[in-house]
Amino acid sequence: MRRASAKGRSAPSNVSFLPEAKTQPKPPRLVLRFAVYTALGLAIAAAGILVFVRQHAIAQAERAVTFHTSFVAESILGGRLRPSDLQRPVSKARRAQLDALFQRQVLVAGALRVQLYAPDGRITYSSDHSQIGSLARHPSAVRSALAGEQAHRVSPISLAGSEIKMMGAYAPVRLDGATPNGAFELDQDYAPIASAARRAFLPVAGVLEILLLGLYGSLFPLLRRVTRRLRSHVSEIEHQALHDSLTGLPNRDLFRERVAAALDETQSGIDGLIVMIFDLDHFKEINDTLGHQSGDHVLRLLAQRLRAVMRDSDTVARLGGDEFGVLAPGTADSDTALQLAARVQRSMERPFVVSGLTLEVEASIGIAVSPEHGDDVETLLRHADVAMYLSKETHHPELYDREHDHYSPDRLALVGELRRAIDEHELVVYYQPRVELSTGAARSVEALVRWNHPERGLLGSGAFLPLAQHTGVVRLITRYVLEAALAQCRAWRELGLDVNVGVNLFSRDLLDGGLPDEVGRLLAANGLEPRRLELEITEDTILADPARTAAILEQLGERGVALAIDDFGTGYSSLNYLKRLPVDVLKIDRSFVSRMEVDEDDAIIVRSTIELGHNLGLLVVAEGVENQETLVRLAELGCDTAQGYHLSRPVPADELTAWLLARAPRVVRMVEAEAR
């Protein structure tokens, strides 16, 4: 676990960065929208209410006319009409009497016409004499009245040559009992009725409009406050979505957007840009020892220092955990990129004080330059990441180099074929001997895997192992090499050759709790003593999970398997592992051995390592011996064993078998001759 704390989002940054790569959507203009939508809603509601009020007023007026008609039928006509008036058309004399009655008491105040109906619906009397004897024009209304109910209808009529609107009200006429003897119709001018309805309607409508307008206006101050608060919240949410809450720096999403925006500008003719990705070395130890709060404090302090040393136009981002990114637009050469990396390193030179403790923090820095190393976001970030992992090995900032990119599409394709290659035994094991400088005997060999690819020919381990280490396939490769190497060791033993074999382990191997039992089974299956096997590990393989790794190495040591620290001198904590782990062999890294004849500092490192190993009771092996002078110098320094191209390249088992059988103590003679 390398990360200090999860990526967060919220606190603002006080660094001036590039403009946002994408314009964030503004909060909706709520006041305007509310004004429009509310006005429409209130208008519709008001219209509905007004229509209801108007219809209610009209209905009230019509009910008043209908009631008046019933009143006339009961109070005036009930005692004045004869049964014959409601059975057949009245005579001329009777018509004159009825005319006088209705003219005097009924046809007043807008009343236009009256009519009487027989039970069969025929008009027996009408103030419009032309209608007497005819059938009702509205029989349904007449039937309702004859059934004892009130009814009315509104219809246009022609009167004195003009078209007017008239309301006819119908009521039952009872002369001698509860059963209607006929029906009575009173027609009135509808204009006064409508006028009365309007008089009742207008005050209500005015009050309603005033109330609605007052409500409409009172909502605006409240809405303005809500809108301001909403805009503030939207702005805060946008910031949280694009910034890290712990450090206040832009997060990975915003960093990618700004790289994309900077690339768009470079395509417009502006100079290129630099993308840098780095993480903190051994940051997990701070978290594990002092706690995550202390680790978070270190990250906050580092963010402040980075802000101080970068230009306003640069972007500094926290990509997650202890990983940071830097974007420097307007520059695109390697020298400037390395100067930028040096500036980042200088920001860490001053120790960090946390909880009263002084901490030294260093970083592995990878750099990609556009357009040289890519012209799109994905490529630049990936190349910077590849360079960062190379920096972990070299311990200084690294520019992207295609030769060190193990993640090319070709290599990814190879990894996809590895399982098939293992099943079909396309992997072959080569062996490189280690020679004792005191006797010249080859007592041990290192097993190195190769791939006899059916289309690409023989591939070295560098073509596929770096990527395979990040997948479960590497466990299959380790098992494959162990089986082949131990079987070959048994074959050499049967030929009388006293040779041990060394096999490299990877991080995933040391995280597998079943590894000790697996090694034990393979040794037993080949009838070999555990000391015949030497397992080589590097510092990087231990760092994946030091506690779990140490437990597995302890189990292997207890079984009697030899353990070797490979590439010693290239890591920061090798001495610590020598003290804590059951190590038997110390292998000096080839980078020191190969230069010891031309670089006195490297020679001093080699000599000191030999002395250290011997003081700890370890066998010391020098890797990378490529000439006779280096071999002699190592012998003079007391190195135990040497390995390198000068002695033998890695070769197939049958070639090495012949080499071993023919091998005499020639190395000793060469060393002695050179000494003389």
Image (tube, rainbow, N blue to C red):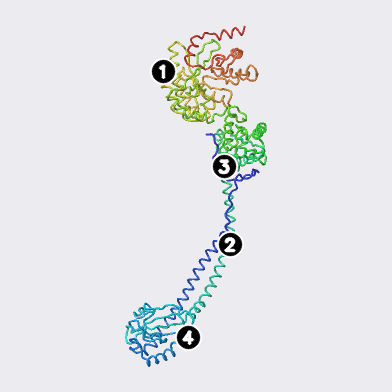
Q: Which residue is mark 3?
A: 253
Vertically, is 136 above or below 4?
below
Mark 3 or mark 4, whichever is nearer to me: 4
Spatial separation of the CA atoms under disc 4 and disc 1: 130 Å
Q: Amino acid at mark 4?
A: Ala
Mark 4 or mark 2, whichever is nearer to me: 4
Q: Position of residue 156 (x, y in %)?
A: 45, 78
Q: Earlier in the sequence, mark 4 or mark 1?
A: 4
Query: Do residues under tags 2 and 3 come within 8 Å of each other at their CB atoms?
Result: no
Spatial separation of the CA atoms under disc 3 and disc 4: 85 Å
Residue count near mark 1 (Cα–Cα under 10 Å), binned few <14, some 14–19, many ≥20: some
Instruction: Please report the residue visible at 48 percent of the width from the left and 72 percent of the height from the top.
Output: 53
Spatial separation of the CA atoms under disc 2 and disc 3: 38 Å
Q: Earlier in the sequence, mark 4 or mark 2?
A: 4
Query: Do residues under tags 1 and 2 come within 8 Å of each other at their CB atoms?
Result: no
Q: Position of residue 166 (x, y in %)?
A: 45, 80
Q: Position of residue 55 (x, y in %)?
A: 47, 73
Residue count near mark 3 (Cα–Cα under 10 Å), binned few <14, some 14–19, many ≥20: few
Q: Secondary structure at mark 4?
A: loop
Q: Amino acid at mark 2?
A: Phe
Q: Earlier in the sequence, mark 3 or mark 4?
A: 4
Q: Which residue is mark 1?
A: 526
Q: Which residue is mark 2?
A: 220
Spatial separation of the CA atoms under disc 4 and disc 2: 52 Å
Q: Which residue is mark 4?
A: 109
Q: Secondary structure at mark 2?
A: helix
